[in-house]
Amino acid sequence: MKKIPLFLFFIFFSICIKAQQNYTDSLRQILASNPEPERAIAVQQQLADWYRASELYPEAIQMAELSLKNSKKISSDNLGTVKAYWILSNIYTNTENFDRSKEYIDKAYSSAKKQNNTLALAYAQYASAVLSSTLFDQKGTLKSLNLALSNIPDQDKESLLTARIYYFLYGLYTEWNDEQKSLEYIHKALLFAQKSSNKNMLANVYSAISVVYTFRYEKTKQKKYLDSIMQPLDKTINMFHRYPGQIMNNTYANTLINKASYYLKYYDSNKPDIQQKIRNTIKDALRATPSSNDELIASGYGMLSELSMMENDLLAAEHYLATAYEQMSKKKKPYYHTLINVLGSLVKLSTKKGDYEKAFMYQQKITDYSNLLFDEQSAATTKRLEAQFEFGKKEREIKALQEKADDQKKKKYLLIALIAIGGIGAVFMFRSYYFNLKYSLAREKQLTAEKNEAALQIKYEKEEQARLKAEQELLTLQQQKLQNEVMANQLHLQHKNDVLLQLKEKLSNQESVNIQQIIREETLTDNDFEKAKFHIQEMHPEFFHNLNKQAKQKLTTLDLKYCAYLYLGMDTKMIANLLNVEPKSVRMTKYRLKQKFDLNAETDLVNYIKEIG
């Protein structure tokens, strides 16, 4: 089993720390040379942001407050002031002091509005986005980021802020699994990160590009995407050595861990050369990883353990996991989630070795750490929810006060307007009083005359309406009479056709029969009835339609004839004479019609048909 030489670890780690100290020392040397106030403030804020990212929060606060003090010496409100508020807000967001963070965000907004400076407003909105993201308010985060982008007047001049916003947007859309948007925003972040002088930002963007292409490779398995995964990581590694101290150890170590994990996941890890690359990459990562970064330490030792498991070297696998556990468990406040994962791997390994006692011991520790993790997460969630509630409450109170102030302002203006209008009205009232009195007397006489005239007009209109109503009723009666006459005439014509047909049949018994002629005559007779029905419908268009609609069974042409005769008030004998049939046949047809209309015995067929008509 190969072990990492301890002295090599300390040598490399010391080199990394020394490089970063040299970078911060160079910034401090600039401050010691008494530069121009604006230059000094910019360097102080650069140092404060570096300390914040390195989790050196006391130093970050000290430097940010110093830059704020110096900015206020220039003027009470300027861009440097807002940037100082922005950094202080980010520091307190990272340390979960949400009240202080919101306090500095409000100050940033207030200062930006006083300056009427859109760039200052963009910094305030970016600080608000960081706080919203920490409080799991994704909608508020997205809104603040888009507003910040729109308020940057020249994105090329503010390339670092622009790159940070696009990088933030990439992170949001990656969480939402929107690959297209993620790729779009990370390429925009790359464009502006390259324009900025911040190498650490550029390194983070390269790592993010690598992550985006893992989605493409896992979908397509095309080698070009595998190359796109590894190339950005190699660029970050080269930058780390080319620009000593300008890329944080965490960024560099994370890049190496990612590269090792891609070798393990996407390459043939059974090949000795790939295994050696993985080991070398992980060892470099572990040497560069700060002792505070539990997640990177656990990931590195976890992959080394996995390689040893592939070689069936269980002792080495256990050693790596135990080393990771030992380093993390010594801390006052370890990262419980990572500890639990390491212990879970130790449980599986001990079970595989048959050492159930040790597996049980590790499982008990998992239970203990899980309880601690639950308590920690519950407290953090409660704290965030309380902060969300308080901020929402304050915003509602501010909005209510603003609305109240606006309302009072409107009422004040309205009162002034009413007083002015009242004064003007009083002047006109006194001047026109005499003329109005004289006019009122004349107007009263005119209104009396108009009232009498209106009464006569109303009386005339009522009489006219009564006359029109009488004429309308007369026209309705005349129309009904004409309808009945038309229907009777048409049915009479039908009767004549039936008589002629009977005569022709009798003649045909004595002479030779022409079948085709009889069929044509029958057709003509039917056509005549259809024509008669058309004329009846012109005067009474809904009669036959309503009959067919009310019938439960289909009505024949003969049925419709009977209905028409009944509607005209003909009795059984008259219908029998017209159709040259027996009265009994007419009664049977009437009975059949009642069945087709689904009428009971008590319902009168004639009244029913007339109601339909």
Image (tube, rainbow, N blue to C red):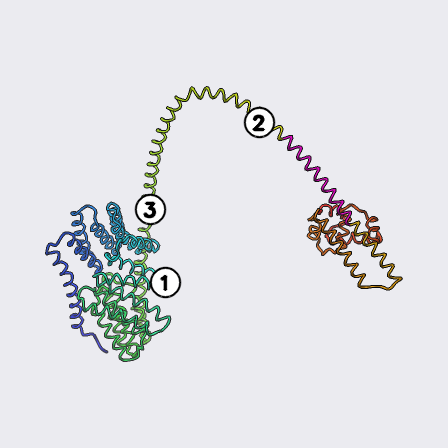
Mark sitting earlier along the chain (3/2): 3
Secondary structure beneath dot 2 equals helix
Q: Nearer the viewer, mark 3 or mark 1?
A: 1
Judge whether 42 appears above or below 16 on screen. Answer: above
Q: Nearer the viewer, residue 505 or 611?
A: 505
Mark sitting earlier along the chain (2/1): 1
Question: Would you say residue 403 sits in the magenta stretch?
Answer: no
Please, what is the three-letter code of the amino acid marked with disc 3? Lys
The residue where tag 3 is placed is: 393
Give the x, y percent position of residue 411. Answer: 35, 34
Secondary structure beneath dot 3 equals helix
Q: Nearer the viewer, mark 3 or mark 2?
A: 2
Magenta part of the chain = 462-490
The residue where tag 2 is placed is: 454
The residue where tag 1 is placed is: 178
Q: Nearer the viewer, residue 150 or 175?
A: 150
Please, what is the three-letter code of the amino acid marked with disc 2? Ala
Judge whether 125 appears above or below 422 on screen. Answer: below
State the residue at coordinates (67%, 33%).
467
Question: Would you say residue 488 sits in the magenta stretch?
Answer: yes
Give the x, y percent position of residue 170. Answer: 31, 61
Q: Nearer the viewer, residue 307 or 234?
A: 234
Q: Is residue 235 left or right of residue 560?
A: left
Residue at the far left in the pictured view: 33
Q: Quadrant of the N terminus?
A: bottom left
